[in-house]
Image (cartoon, helix red, strand yellow):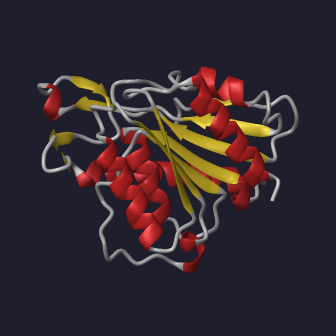
Amino acid sequence: MSDTLILEPTLGADACIIWLHGLGADRYDFLPVAEALQEVLDSTRFVLPQAPTRAVTINGGWAMPSWYDILAMRPERAINEAQLEESSAQVLALVQAQIDGGIDPRRIFLAGFSQGGAVVLHAAFLRWQGELGGVLALSTYAPTFSDDMQLSDSQRQLPVLCLHGTFDDVVLPAMGRAAHDRLAAAGVPVAWRDYPMAHEVLPQQIRDIGTWLVEHLQR
């Protein structure tokens, strides 16, 4: 992705977080979050890709940054799965580029907010077969997960932190919880944290993410 924003750490990078924004946002959306997290992760590179601009059916066909088209809000999102696959492949190309650049895959994390979270969950658990450090799933859901999905040994060892607002009326908390529960049922070490917020990000949430990342990067 030629328009990917890369935030280098103050020290030489020995870890990387690839962070996807949500529908209608852009690669700068989580730049302040990355800058805040680098205060405690001073050797972690942040890679912030940009979604392509495409028509979004549920928004009257208006073109906007979108990882995939959403065709209907019910039942639990009808989506263009081919576009989700394309976005997932782009994320995994970024992962491979970090590995080729010398970053240990166990120190590469995928993070995504809302629609971006759906992409990273799909990429990590239904497409990537190697090691990774973990996944951060913010205010998101997993439209491609199923109750009988089969995970590899490496996928079952991948830690996940799901964070959601109790007042979220865009991606309902139940949708995020369903993704969490399917991962838990498959044996994945997944944690759930909710916050008194809507479809957004709060400072306390970022502090919790920083604590979680520090914990897993020190292993």
Would residue 211 be found to the left or right of residue 77 on screen? Answer: right
Q: Is residue 54 at all visible to an observer of this figure?
A: yes
Residue closer to the observer: 87 or 36? 36
Which residue sits at x=55%, y=72%? 156
Would residue 126 be found to the left or right of residue 33 on screen? Answer: left
Residue closer to the observer: 8 or 122? 122
Q: Indicate the position of residue 23 as horizontal and vertical percent values.
A: 34, 31
Which residue sits at x=79%, y=27%? 39
Q: Indicate the position of residue 189 as horizontal and vertical percent values.
A: 57, 65
Q: Quadrant of residue 150?
A: bottom left
Q: Indicate the position of residue 28 as horizontal and vertical percent values.
A: 53, 21
How many numbered markers are drawn?
A: 0
Quarter of the C terminus within the rendering: bottom right
Above or below: residue 30 compared with residue 173: above
Q: Residue furthest right?
A: 11
Would residue 65 be found to the left or right of residue 15 on screen? Answer: left
Residue closer to the observer: 40 or 18? 40
Q: In which quarter of the image is residue 58?
A: top left
Which residue sits at x=42%, y=72%? 185
Q: Indicate the position of residue 67 as horizontal and vertical percent values.
A: 35, 40
Above or below: residue 142 compared with residue 49: below
Would residue 71 be found to the left or right of residue 179 on screen? Answer: left
Above or below: residue 165 compared with residue 32: below
Q: Is residue 5 at all visible to an observer of this figure?
A: no
Which residue sits at x=72%, y=38%? 45
